Amino acid sequence: MTQPRVSDASPAIVVAGTLDTKGAEIAFVRREFERRGHRVIVIDCGILGEPGTAATIGRAAVAKAGGGDITAMRAAHDRADAIPTMIRGLEALLTELRDQGQVAGYFGLGGGTNAALASAAFHVLPFGVPKMLVSTVACGNTRPFIGMKDVVLIHSVVDILGLNPFLEGVLVQAITGLSAMAGAASAASRPAAGTSLGMTTFGSTTEGAMIAHEALTRHGLDILSFHARGIGGEAMEAFIREGRIRAVLDLTTTEIADELVGGICSAGPDRLSAAGERGLPQVVLPGAIDIVNFGPRPTVPERFRGRTMTAHTPQATLMRTTVDENVAIAAFIAEKLNRARGPAAVVLPLRGFSAYDIEGGPFFDPAADAAFCDSLTGKLDRHIPVARVDAHINQHAVIDRATALLIDMLSDSTRKVEAS
C-alpha cells in the first residue's frame, strides 16, 4: 500500500515493525488502537519473510526511502546492511508524516531489531509527541534506545513471539496508556511559551537552584530545570535548538568535567553550544565543575586510584577535579562562550562550586578553584563580563548576582525588539 497523503486526515498512531516476525502482534495492536477510535498507520520494516498482516506503508517504500531496493536486499540476505537501510527509510518516512502533522503518537514493540527501529522514531519525533516501546530490552541500559527523548518503556517480561494471555494483557495496558497520552498531547507537543528559561541543576547545586527558581519565577518566567547528568544537558541543548527556551541560567556545568576527564555523565562535546549559536542570553554559573561522576566505587576506572573521592549515594561515586583538569574545563567553557552570538556573562563563586566544595567539605580545594577562575577569566573575550562573588554557589549572594544579570539581559533584549 502507499503512504497516506490526505491533508485533512486526523493524526494517527504510527506502529512500525517487522511484519514478517511480528505480524500477529502488530495486527492485535492495530485492532486495539482502532477499537479506541484512533487511525493507525502501520509501517512494515521487515525484510526476508512474508508480512503477517497488511501494512499502510510497505517494506518496498521503506527500503526506497532509505536508499535501497527491497528485492536486492532480500536476495543478498545481508542483515548488517539491510537493517540500517530500513532504519534510514523509517526515519525519512516518519519525518514526512511528522511534517504533515499526521503523527499523534508512536508505538513500537519487539526485541533488539524492533527496538532499534523505535529508536529511529524517537530520534525523529519531537518532545511532547507520545512515544512508547514495549520490549524485552526495556530494562538495563536503555539510553541507546531512548537517547534524551520523552519515552515510555514497558518491559514485556516474556518475549514478543506469538500472542498469549500474559502478553496480550501487557499490550492492552500499554495501548490504553498511549491512547490516553495521544488524547492529551496536542498542548504538550507545542513548543513552550516564549517566557521559558532553561536552568541546569544537580544534587550538589540544588540549594542554589531553588533560590534561583524562586527569584526568576517572581519575574514571570517559566523555569525548565534540567538534571545535569548527561542526558539533562543534551536535552537542554535540544530544547534550545527547537526554540522552546529564550534564555539560559547554566548553573551546573559538571557534564563538561565528565566529558574531559572521563566520567559517566558527559553531555558530549556540544554542551554549552546551542544558546550561543542561537544568540540567546545566557549566564554561566559553573556549578559542580569540581566533580567527575562515576557509578558504584568498584566501577571507577583503575587509572583514578588514589584520587579524592566521596560517595554521593551507594550508586554514585564523585571524584574531585585537579588543578590541571580545572584549567582544561575553563578552556572548554571559554571557547564556547567566546563564540556566542548573543549576550553572555559568567559568575564565579569564590568560596566553592558545589555542596562538597565548601570549607570543611571533602572537595574543598581553593587552589584548584582559583586555577579554574583565573584560567577562565584569562581566556574569555573582554566583552564577556565576569562577576567574582565572595560566597559559595548555594548562597544568595551568588545566585542573586546571576539572576540579576540574566534579568537585565532579558530586559535589554525586550527593549531591542520593541525598538525594532
Image: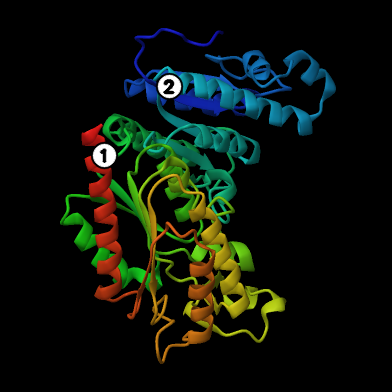
Res 135 quadrant in image: top right
Q: Residue at label 1?
A: 416
Pick the quarter of the image with the N terminus: top right
Instruction: Give percent across and percent down for residue 4.
Output: 47, 10
Which residue is painted at 77% across and 13% down in the image? 71
Res 40 quadrant in image: top left
**Direction from residue 401 to residue 170 in the image, left or right:** right
Q: Amino acid at mark 2?
A: Arg
Q: Is residue 65 visible?
A: yes
Question: What's the image's color scheme?
Answer: rainbow
Q: Secondary structure at mark 2?
A: helix
Q: Residue at label 2?
A: 31
Residues at marks 2 and 1, CA–CA distance in whole angstroms: 55 Å
Which residue is painted at 84% across and 22% down in the image? 76
- Of residues 265 and 254, which is closer to you in this image? 254
Ranked by sequence position, the earlier of labels 2 and 1 is 2
Q: Tag 1: Cα neighbours inside 10 Å, few (<14), some, or many (≥20)?
A: few
Q: Amino acid at mark 1?
A: Lys
Vertical comparison of 244 with 24: above or below: below
